[in-house]
Every structure is written in C-alpha cells, then in structure tokens.
Image (tube, rainbow, N blue to C red):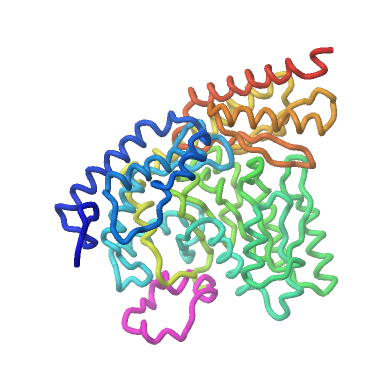
Amino acid sequence: MPTTNHSLPIDTSADAAATILRLAGELVLDHLSAGPNLPAMDTELAAAFLADPAARRLPHEEGRSLRDALDVVGRATRLGVNHASGKMLGFIPGSSLFLSAIADLISGVANSYTGVSFGSPGMVALERDVLRWLCDTMGLPAGSAGILTSGGSLATVSALLCARTDHLHGDLSRARIYLTGQTHYCVAKAARIIGLPPSALRTVGVDAALRMDLDALRAAVEEDRAAGLQPFCVVGTAGTTNTGAIDPLAGIAAVAREQKLWFHVDGAYGGFFRLTERGRARLAGIDQADSIVLDPHKGLFLPFGTGCLLVRDRAVLRRAHSAEDRVYLRDVADAEENDFADISPELTRPNRGLRMWLPLQVHGVAAFREALDEKLDLAELAYRRLSALPGISVLEAPQLSVLAFHCHGSDGTVEGDDRLTDQLVQQLNASGAVFLSTTKLNGRVMARVAALSLHTTRAMMEEALTAIADQLAVLMAFSPRRRA
C-alpha cells in the first residue's frame, strides 16, 4: 500500500505512538497552562478559522502531517466559550479533570468492551464499584443499581422508562407526570421519546423561591385521578438550572408514597453537593427517590459525556431495558450481576467508568468535597456583593452555587430592566473578562452567575464581580434618568 511523507501508518507502532504522544502532549500542556486564564469567550478569531480552507479541508486521499493537524486542533480549542477558563460563570460550567482525560486515553487504547462483564471483567468491576459508591453517596439501599450514560438527558430517558415500566399500564394517553415550570426541559424531551403525548406533562405551581408547591402537587394528582387519568410519576429537582432552587424533596417523597407515584429526582446539576455538609442538609429527601439523575461532568468536574442514572430497585432497571431475544450472547451473559447491556439502552458503549474511577481513587473524595464547598462559598460571596450594588436586585440567596439577578432600567419598567440586563451581560461577555448567561423568570430577563468550574477561584470571582460593577456603572452613567 503506497504511503506519503505526511501520513502516519494506520496501524500505529509503539515508536510512532511515542512521537504522537510527544506532539499531542505539547498541545495538552499548552492548553493546561493557558486555559484557566484565557478569556471566558473568544469569538474574534472564529470567523477566520471557519473560513480557512486549510483548517476546514475535508479528508484527502493523502494525509497531512500530525503537527499540522494538531495545530488546527489547537486553534479550534481556543474558539467560542472557553470551558477551561475559571471566568466561565454562564450556564452550568464544565471543567474536565486531567486524570479523566488520561483515563479516556487508556480506555481508548485498550478499547475494552464493557457491555458485558465477560468482555472485560476487570473494567466492568471497576465501573460497578463506582456506581455502588454513587448509590451509597445518595443514600440508596443495597438493592439499588446504576448506569453511566452520555449525559443527564439520556439518563432521564431511562429514568422515565423505568417509571413507565413499573407504574404505568394501559392507555398512555391518560398518563400524567408532575413537574414545575423550573424543571429541566430534558424531562419533556424524554417523555416524548418514550412515547408519551404532550398532555402527559402537568405543570404544578411553585412558591416564592421557585420550589414545587406540595399542596398544588397533591391537588393536581387528586384532580387527575378523579378524572380517570393515570398519575404515575413526579419529578423533583435538586438544584434547578435557572436559579439552583431545590424542590422540597422529602415532602415530594411523602406525596409520592401517599399517591403511589414514582419519585424521580433530577440531580444533574446539584446532586453531588450532597458530598458537602451544607448540601447534604439542603438535599434532604433525595435518598427516598426511586430514581436519580446525576451529571458527573458537572458536580465531579469530569469531561462532558458523563451522565448517570441511579435506580432504587435494580430489578426495575433490568425490566425496563432488557430483551430476551439475545441468543447470540448466551455464552457471555452475566445473570447474577446484570450486564450493562441488560440494564441500559446501549449494547456497544465506551468505557465510561474509568474516567470517574481514576480521579476518585487518586485525588480522594475529600478533594471533591472541598472543591464543591468552595463553589458554595463563591456563590455566597457573589450574592453579598451583588446585593450591595445599587441598580441590581438578586432574586434569592443561593441554595447551591447558582444565583440570578436583574438590573434596574432607566425608565422604571420591566422592559427597561430587561434591556439593561441584556446589555450588561452582552458587554461583559464581549470583553472576555467573564462569561454570564441569561434566562427569563416570571417574564423578566435575569442574568445568571453559576459557580461550578473547577478553575474558578476566589480571586477570579472577585475580578468577575468587579467587572460587573464597573460595567453596570458605565451603563447607568449613560442612562436617560442619570442625564436628566
């Protein structure tokens, strides 16, 4: 087979691998040294990169040099929102632990098949150990089990499938799931994927802190049941994306038992705060859930693509996902432990367990607890500083590490407030000094500060708050009210 001067053999030798690792290592080290201090967002170079034919060339018959290809990759990683930056305070930040990346490299090279334990008993055992630790951490009993997924969205699909399998019978058109207007939209998406109509979702009211109203929940369930419908699931949130609000989980669990509902908790953002003393108190009741979704790529700082579903009863997880007609796997089935192929949507799957196992083993759980405690401290700092600024109203004291605020516009109207809040966020983001995001609550635009990046230090939060105060002062100085 002919080769070129540029291309590497497709079957890489150990010597070639050493060269690849050296060159890729240079890129990685540069990213690690610069990433946390880079601008929170860089869009100025994006247009040039996207229009560059050398960077955007499609695969050729002949390869290009590895150094040239890595240069393109290095340029691409610097564009857009920089999740490695500690100044990233928008949405729910991601971090990506270095040891997790090393674990992925090892997993990719070893290419262990973890769908059934026969294929890789050691790696499957390590993943099961991690999942057992997760169940124990959330307070679930010995009969519980879990799976690792690509993220919270797929985990939610499996969670609702478990709920449907265990609680719902007959006509799906009469099914009802109860949630609030603050519930993540992945629940609606998951309901649609498992075959439920839009009418299956019933939104119940919230209190002043945007937490589920228990009286409204109970009344909605009783009204629907009296109308001949089939209430089967209630979704509580352990830290909403909008504001970090925590639904009254223990109270929801009591209503779920009383009304014979499956109790699902969306802990994708906030669940891992249970590792901390403050979080454990605030998340009281999560241990009573029938299913819990977690995102280790948020609360454990792992790379994107690491979600988790925990289910109180392993048998339900298996009934929801297994298929009997799999005779070609009869020689490798693990009937005792339940292979991941039997309790998850995936047959072929990456080895996700190692990316969690390795950093937990090496860094220790205490390191993660300390990091999460720091994020709670940073959110409280942001609340105190923003509450003291003239021209800003903060919605509520943070329950976890997210808070929302809005600016007071020049004309005293909601529309004026919205314009000023949007302006503030847009100009801050354009500066690269910090990246915030916005949402809408009760018809009003709110800016959000989300402290969850591993790289966000107190010094960086101080800089971000100073940037917010300075930019707000500039905007207010040019408002019509100030000029009058």
Q: Does the magenta run of residues contain 179?
A: no
Location of residue 437 (image quadrant): top right
Q: Position of residue 205 (x, y in %)?
A: 79, 51
Q: Quadrant of the N terminus?
A: bottom left
Location of residue 292 (image quadrant): bottom right
446 sits left or right of 436 in the view: right
The stretch of residues the image draws in magenta is: 316-344
Q: Position of residue 272 (x, y in %)?
A: 51, 46
381 vs 75, nearest the viewer: 75
366 vs 114, nearest the viewer: 114
466 sits left or right of 349 in the view: right
Q: Residue at x 59, y 21 (%)?
A: 467
Q: How many marks?
A: 0
Q: Residue at x 42, y 32 (%)?
A: 36
Q: Position of residue 7 (x, y in %)?
A: 24, 55
Q: Residue at x 31, y 83 (%)?
A: 331
Answer whether residue 170 is visible to the viewer in this image. Answer: yes
Q: Quadrant of the C terminus?
A: top right
Outermost top residue: 484
Location of residue 73 (image quadrant): top left
309 vs 63, nearest the viewer: 63
Q: Residue at x 20, y 53 (%)?
A: 5
Residue 348 drawn above or below residue 413: below
Q: Position of residue 458 (x, y in %)?
A: 49, 25
Q: Does the magenta run of residues contain 328?
A: yes
